[in-house]
Amino acid sequence: MLWIILGQMPLPQATTQELHWKMKKSFSRSTLRGQKGFSEIGLKLEMVSQDALRRTIFPLGGLTKQFVKKIAAENRLHHVLQKKESMGMCFIGKRNFEHFLLQYLQPRPGHFISIEDNKVLGTHKGWFLYTLGQRANIGGLREPWYVVEKDGVKGNVFVAPRRDHPALYRDLLRTSRVHWITEEPPAALVRDKMMECHFRFRHQMALVPCVLTLNQDGTVWVTAVQAVHALTTGQFAVFYKGDECLGSGKILRLGPSAYTLQKGQHRGGVAIENPSDGPEDGPGLRPLP
C-alpha cells in the first residue's frame, strides 16, 4: 500500500464516514470490512497519528490486489506477477528463523514441559524462539505438541498435545495505553467506562465481539464474548466499531486460560509480559501471585 503524505495544510479531523479510498486525501480510519482485500488496512492504520492521517492519500484507491496484478499482466510487468506473497518476517529472507534470532540474542536453554502433568519432554535454546499456538519440534517425539504458555523467568515452555487444547484459549487481556485514532477515547467509553465493540490481533482473523473496560491510566481490559485462540502478549489488539477502526493497544497481560479455569488453579507469572505495567486487576480477575 502506497502512502503519500501531503505538505503542511489545514485539514479537518479524519472520520470514517468521509472515506472514499480513491487517489485523494484520506479523511478516515475505516477498514472497509465489507470490501474484499482491505482486511489488513486496520492493522496498518491503527497506529497512525491523526495529524498524519489527515494528510494521507491512497494512490491505489479501492483496487484489490488481484485487480492490480491484472493490470500488471496487461502491461507485461512480470516481476510483479512472479513476486510471492509475503508471510511472516519477510525481511529475513530464506534464512532459518531460529538461527536468525540467535545471531542477535544469547541462547537461554530451558525445558519443554507438559501443561497437563508437568513432565519434562525435552529442551530448547530459548523461550523467546516460540509463540503461542506454534508447533514445538521436540526431539524424540513423533506426535505434535503445541506451545501454550511461556515462563520468561524460569525459561520453560509449556506445551499441550493438541492445537485446540483449552490451554490455548483465553477471553481476557489488558493492553497498554490505547492509541485512539481520533486522539480521544470514544464518548460512550468515557461516559460508561465500558463499551461493546470488536477486536482482532492477527491479520485476516475474524473480528471478535468484546467489551472494553477503560482504566484510569488509559489502558483497557478486553473481555471477549467467547474464548480466543492463541492470544499473545506483544501483539496489538485493534478495535473496531461497525466499519470504523478506533485504534489499538499492545497486549501486555493475559487472563487465565480455559484449561486453568477448568482445573481451578492459576499458574502465576506466566501470563504477564511486564507486571509493573498493570496497576489494576481487571474485571473478574484476581491479582497474579
Image: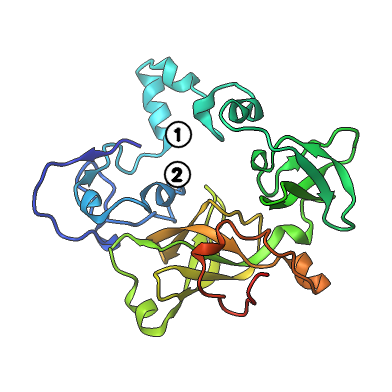
Do residues under tags 2 and 1 come within 8 Å of each other at their CB atoms? yes
Outermost residue to the left? 9
Residue 76: which quarter of the image? Answer: top left
Q: Is residue 192 above or below residue 74?
A: below
37 is higher (above) or lower (below) than 240 = above
Instruction: Specify the amino acid type for callout 1.
Output: Gln
Q: Nearer the viewer, residue 284 or 75?
A: 284
Image quadrant occupied by the N terminus: top left
Mark 2 = which residue?
A: 37
Q: Position of residue 117 (x, y in %)?
A: 90, 57
Quadrant location of the C terminus in the rendered image = bottom right
Q: Amino acid at mark 2?
A: Gly
Question: Looking at the image, which residue sits at the far bottom?
Answer: 192
Q: Position of residue 108 (x, y in %)?
A: 69, 38
Q: In terms of sequence position, does the residue under pointer 2 or pointer 1 come before the other? A: 2
Q: Residues within 10 Å of mark 1 (few under 14, many from 20)?
A: few
- Seen from the viewer's position, the closer of residues 254 and 18 is 254
In the rendered image, residue 246, in percent from the top left (x then y), is placed at 37, 63
Q: Which residue is mark 1?
A: 66
Residue at the location (53% across, 54% down)?
A: 201
Q: Secondary structure at mark 1?
A: helix
**Crowding at mark 2 (Cα within 10 Å: few <14, some 14-19, many 20+):** some
Report how far apart the C-alphas of labels 2 and 1 lie in the structure. Answer: 9 Å
Q: Secondary structure at mark 2?
A: loop
Q: Is residue 30 left or right of residue 266?
A: left
Please tell me which residue is depicted at 10% across the width and 45% down the height of the picture. Answer: 8
